[in-house]
Amino acid sequence: MKKTDSKRLVYSLIGLVLFYGVIILLLHRIESDVPDSKMHSWQDGLWYVVATITTVGYGDVIPVTYWGRTLGFVVMLSSLGIYGFIISQITNFMNTIKERKELGLNGTNFKNHVVIIGWNEFSHSVIGHLAGAGREIAIVTKDRSSIDIIKEYHDLDKIFTLYADFNNFEMLEKANIREASVVFVNMNDDTEKLVYVINLKKHFADLNYVVTLDNGNLKNTFHAAGVTYAISKNEISSKLLASYIYEPDVAILTEEIIAYAHQDDEYDMKQIMVKANNPFAGIFYEKVFFDLKKHCNVVLFGIVKVTGSVRKLMKNPDGDIKVEVGDYLIILMDGKGGDKLKRHFLIDEGI
């Protein structure tokens, strides 16, 4: 509940307690000395008031004087208002809980997830691929209507939505942004993205940031500002278009492998981390290459060595390179190959 609503509820409850407290004391004073009365103490008055308000009406304790019955009449009429008040407060409370959940104000416990700041058609497409790959996603939007759209199209078990001002950095904590694997800043203008990333890094310095650029010439500027990956939309689309013109089959395969494979016969390029229980740890790259092809019918394309925050990608390296815990294997596979990979080697996709 909002603070104003909570205060209003507390003041209303205090008012009700005082109102009925006064009535109980008056009933006791009026009725206690009357011979036929059964209200000999304030506890008897309390019993009568509670029985009347709850409509139980035992009738064992009732006022017998004129003024006592007048007060009883007030209690009976006011009980109708109390029920309306209680029902409205319960309804308001339940609606508040529902609204807080819908707006993401209760926060999320997602970890190693993707945080997307800004919602539009492009982020809708990105989310489709990420959700297809099984990634958990936290979306921060300042457009209330977009929350309903997101919920209509996506699995809510994997997606958390937060309605917040982008510059309210305390609210971003509700998206558990500090535990995110990457933050995708998705705003309308390159300049707006740059200014926002600079401010965001003041609060969350150690995160990986991704932006898409309309102007590819700004890549170096964004990298200097601390962005991990700056991607030019025009550059990617122009390369793919050129590939379709002079090597269309390569272009078709390229487009397929950079997206999530929805069918078993579709191919996907996956990045897989080598963990401590992985049987490939300590094995030469060349042997890993042949074992993967033999057992899972997947193709090892490269390996990423990670030292601190520095990532070194080696594409199809020499066979004397050893696979170590913490490395990432770049593998081309179809859906069946992915299932075999998990079953035989207990490794999962993604960073």
Image (cartoon, grey):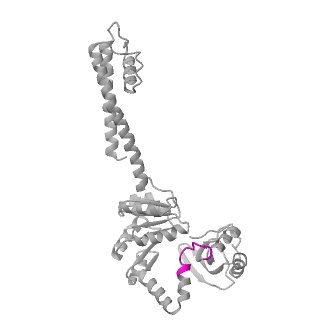
> Along the horizontal axis of the image, is 224 left or right of 333?
left
Residue that lies at the very extreme toward the bottom in this rendered image: 246
From the top left corner, tell me how far across and down residue 111 is, in percent.
Answer: 52, 61
Q: In which image quadrant can residue 162 be found? A: bottom left
Magenta segment: does it hold 258? yes
In the figure, is residue 346 to the left or right of 10? right
Image coordinates for residue 278, horizontal then vertical, percent = 68, 69
Q: Nearer the viewer, residue 203 or 14?
A: 14
Note whether 119 is above or below 78 in the view shown. below
| Residue for point 34% across, 46% down | 3
Q: Which residues are magenta?
A: 255-265
Q: Name the quadrant of the C terminus.
A: bottom right
In this view of the protein, which residue sits in the foreground, 288 or 268?
Answer: 268
Residue 208 seen in this snapshot? no
Residue 1 in view (yes/no):
yes
Q: How far from the left and from the top, in percent, is residue 220?
A: 41, 81
Relative side of 326 to 111, left or right = right
> Residue 31 in magenta?
no
- Residue at x-position 55% and y-position 79%: 256
Corner quadrant of residue 68: top left
**In x, y percent, where is residue 175?**
45, 60
Vertical position of residue 12 compared to residue 195: above or below: above
